[in-house]
Amino acid sequence: MAKIFCDFRFLLLVAAGIFIYIQMRLFATQSGYADRLAAAIEAENHCTSQMRSLIDQISLQQGRIVALEEERKRRDQECGQMKSLVQDLERKDLQRLTDKMQVPVAAVVIIACNRADYLERTIKSVLKYQRPISSRFPLFVSQDGSNPDVKSTTLSYDQLSYMQHLDFEPVQTERPGELIAYYKIARHYKWALDQLFYKHNFSRVIILEDDMDIAADFFDYFEAAAMLLDKDKSIMAVSSWNDNGQKQFVHDPYELYRSDFFPGLGWMLARSIWDELKENHKGRQFIRPEVCRTYNFGEHGSSLGQYFKQYLEPIKLNDVKVNWRSMDLSYLLEDKYSMHFANTVKKATPVYGAGVVLKAYNIDGDVRIKYRDQSDFENIARQFGIFQEWKDGVPRTAYKGVVVFRHQTSRRIFLIGPESLKLLQIEES
């Protein structure tokens, strides 16, 4: 019994030893796992820290990239602006160089005397369209006399040149009762043209008066017409004016005519013609538009308001921008125009007898009416309301005795002189 008890105790000791060993092994294993877990957690924390650091670095780099992209865009924009500025400067330098080398089409002179308020309006009207092309059309004001307001008004503009004509010689009129003012104006015109042609050496001059507005295509019109002056020596001058240019008598802004009557009121003359002619036009003709490129607003002046209300105030100033550079104006040359005009007159329907205005109104298309003499012309002109005046045997606007104007619509009326059809080589119907 005692032996059995001793064996049991031995077994308990053995079991206890084994249990203690197992517990120690378990503790050692758990300690290893705990160390590994701690190491893993530490590694994870380190990895997380590195990840966050990397993310921070990436964010920082992205910020730098965005900043660099914005800087690149800003510099590209600055480069673009600089390039545009350089191109603009090069263009302006080229334009200045071109302007210096460019031969003017014509000098423009405004003839003035003592109407400073009128003059200022005219200068502003001219500069409105002349500024962009000032090198091709240099602007002058020529003052007759010493009116201080006219001089100060002119000198207040740095875009033009000032000339002053002082004439103290007495005027002798050819006929009693004639206005001295017209003789003084003629002297001033001659002096101004001599100055511009011979002192300033221009090849052409456009003459305006100090009471005129100009149309938007005024300069384009004269630039295109300069070719006609150069090619055709039978043309004395090109005018921007039509005496019968009242609103009811015009229609086509593209239509130009030759005329034996000097229209005046905004006209261009070549030096070669001035050299030869001075005050005698030797049968030469003039170019005029159907629709005026100048408008005369001067009710008060040397003419004492003559004709203003009836003929000048109702004038239509062209408001259509015509591309004259694309126009073929060769039909206006002397060797072509007579046939061109004759073909137009030939197609017109003849009207005879009394009541020509009503008869013309009732006919579709162009009409021609023959007048016997000056008195008959004046009677017919009075019925239509056009200018009745003749000068040196020529009706205003006439070409070979033919006066043409529109009536109510686009219909043209041709008033035909007694010799006109013969001069135009048209057989009498």
Image: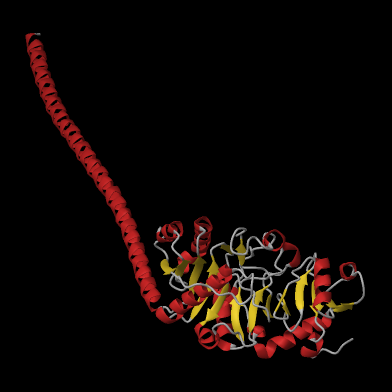
Q: Is residue 11 visible?
A: yes
Quarter of the figure that contains the N terminus: top left
Considering only vertical position in the picture, is 156 above or below 199?
Answer: above
Q: Is residue 106 visible?
A: no
Q: Residue furthest front?
A: 176
- At 31% from the left and 50% from the top, the residue drawn is 70
Quarter of the figure that contains the C terminus: bottom right
- At 37% from the left and 68% from the top, the residue drawn is 92
Q: Is residue 31 shown left or right of residue 351?
A: left
* Image location of residue 141, percent across then percent down: 46, 67
Considering only vertical position in the picture, is 12 above or below 100?
Answer: above
Image quadrant assignment for residue 4 = top left
* Image location of residue 27, percent across then percent down: 13, 24
Considering only vertical position in the picture, is 217 above or below 328?
Answer: above
In front here: 36 or 143? 143
In front here: 82 or 212? 212
Image quadrant assignment for residue 395 = bottom right
* Image location of residue 209, percent across then percent down: 55, 66
Image quadrant assignment for residue 22 = top left
Q: Residue furthest right?
A: 353
Considering only vertical position in the picture, is 332 above or below 292?
Answer: below
- At 76% from the left and 82% from the top, the residue drawn is 401
Q: How many marks?
A: 0
Q: Say how the picture is coloured.
A: secondary structure
In front here: 110 or 102? 110
* Image location of residue 159, percent across then percent down: 41, 64
- At 13% from the left and 21% from the top, the residue drawn is 19
